[in-house]
Amino acid sequence: MKIETRLKLNYLISLSVIIILLIVLVWIYRMMIKAEENEDLAADIRKNALERIMFRDEYLMTNVERARAQFISKTKTVDNLLTRALHNFTKTSDKALCEEIQKSFDITNTIFSRIVNIRAKDSNLRRGSIASPEGEQRLIGQLILKAYDLNGKIARLNDSAELTATNVREALVLLLLCFISLMVISNIYNSVSIGNLLGKRVKMISEGTTIIGAGNLGYRIAVSGDDELSILARQTNDMAAQLQNSYAALEQEIGYRESANRELEAFSYSVSHDLRTPLRAINGFSAAVIEDYADKLDDEGKRLLNVINDNAKKMGHLIDDLLAFSRIGRQELKKQEIDMHVLFNSAAQNFIYTVSERVFHLDIKPMLAAIGDPVLITQVIINLLSNAIKFSEPKDSIDIEIGCSPEEHENIYYVKDHGVGFDMQFADNLFGVFQRLHSQDQFEGTGVGLALSQRIIHRHGGRMWAEGIVNEGAIFYFTLPKSRNAE
């Protein structure tokens, strides 16, 4: 059963129980209201009945008309109360008791009326007289006995009403306690049952994802059921199976690539070795011809031999650059914090001596530290400075600016020159192997330096790009991760 369905079912059950208990509470409350009304009614009957006896005794002793009138008034009040009692009391025993009280009450009224009639006929009976006819004495005795019986029945009715009201109140309190207890137990049960289900499922999924995340892709979460967490566990198992298959395919692909890389490396080494041997021979023989047969060659012959020698050397440099480019992807990075100002300044000082005969302006702005391999980053800086100097040769002076700007997670470094620049529509060609925007006759180079530099920066997780304007100069940018100590 799904967790959502389980929660809805528990909610419906709890709601049904609450509705039923509320209905019972309302019913019990109405019973309590009625029981309290009956209790008050019985108390009123008893109170007025006692007052009626008091006025009766006063009349019998004094024969005062006022006492008789008050007795009759109380009689009417008690009679009205008994009529209400016959209607309100629904309990069989109480209703029967009310009927008996009514009968006894009627009898006492009859006896009292007879006593009043006897006194009205006896003109000799005066107020305060102690003596009374024998028939009246018998009636008075009967009246007292019946009144005593009536009071006993009224007391029993009052006790029964009080007991009923007390029982109903206790039932209401007990029902309230049951209601509260049931709600607490229901909430605890729902919380514990749902909590145990969620806790076990979440724990198993958490442990499973931790094991799978640690690299054990063959592990499977053992959760059964059709609830949401079970579905999540199965989806996690499916994902692990897909990752396992993908990882196996990737390992196979890596194996193929490693094998291909080893073959390529062996091929590159073989090619470079095979190419270097004839190049050395060309250099050696051309130099020997110039040295041994210089007197037999004219100037054109010497020039041609020097051209052969220079191109052989360029070919050697090209082979070295290609080997360096192919190896950069496999070279292990030894990252550390780099003082970029020191690195730029050191590289620039080496170039100052090579251009001592020209005006050289170098402006190194404040540098931020970065994280990287110092040897490889030095190679990038040398390549960029070398290009900046080379492409500034047609200008009257060499003006190079080096700067840095911070970003959120990286620093942007740039090398700016005021050389020949380039057309931005060919900017993407700058970083391709053998891609040149100027001819070999204009500027020397193998066309590998920028491609090598970009590959180094990419291995550091950075970016490299360039901006330029023809005959106004170029700016080359690259990014490196920030030093943590600099943040």
Image (cartoon, rainbow, N blue to C red):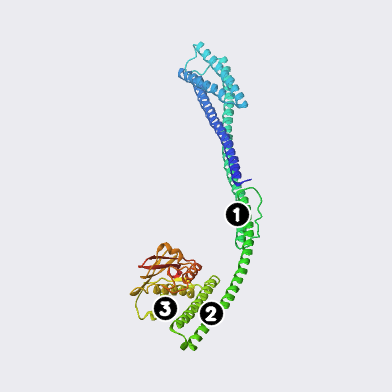
Residue 48: percent from left, percent from top: 51, 25
Can you tell which quarter of the image residue 359 is in?
bottom left
* Residue 202, label in figure: 1
Q: Secondary structure at mark 1?
A: helix
Placement of the C terminus among the 4 image quadrants: bottom left
Q: Is residue 401 left or right of residue 241?
A: left
- Dot 3 falls on a residue whose secondary structure is helix
Q: Is residue 265 above or below residue 291?
A: above
Relative height, residue 396 to residue 60 (above, below): below
Q: Is residue 371 left or right of residue 173?
A: left
Q: Earlier in the sequence, mark 2 or mark 1?
A: 1
Q: Secondary structure at mark 2?
A: helix
Q: Which quarter of the image is occupied by the N terminus?
A: top right
Q: Which residue is mark 2?
A: 279
Compare residues 487 and 447 and report the one nearer the observer.
447
Residue type, mark 1 in image: Val
Q: Position of residue 450 (x, y in %)?
A: 46, 70
Give the camera-side residue of 412 and 429. Answer: 429
The residue closer to the viewer here, 304 or 487, is 304
Q: Position of residue 159 (x, y in %)?
A: 58, 31
Decide if residue 481 is in sight here: no
Name the amino acid type tagged 3: Ser
Q: Which residue is mark 3?
A: 346
**Mark 2 or 3, closer to the camera:** 2
Give the distance between the C-alpha atoms of the residues marked 3 and 1, in whole angstroms. 58 Å
Q: In the rendered structure, which disc, 2 or 3, sits on the residue that comes first in sequence? A: 2
Mark 2 burial class by Cα count in 10 Å: few <14, some 14-19, many 20+: many
* Residue at position x 55%, y 14% in the image: 114
In this picture, residue 318 sits left or right of residue 209 = left
Of 224 and 85, which appears nearest the observer? Answer: 224
Q: Name the spot of residue 28 as percent of width and height, x first.
A: 57, 33
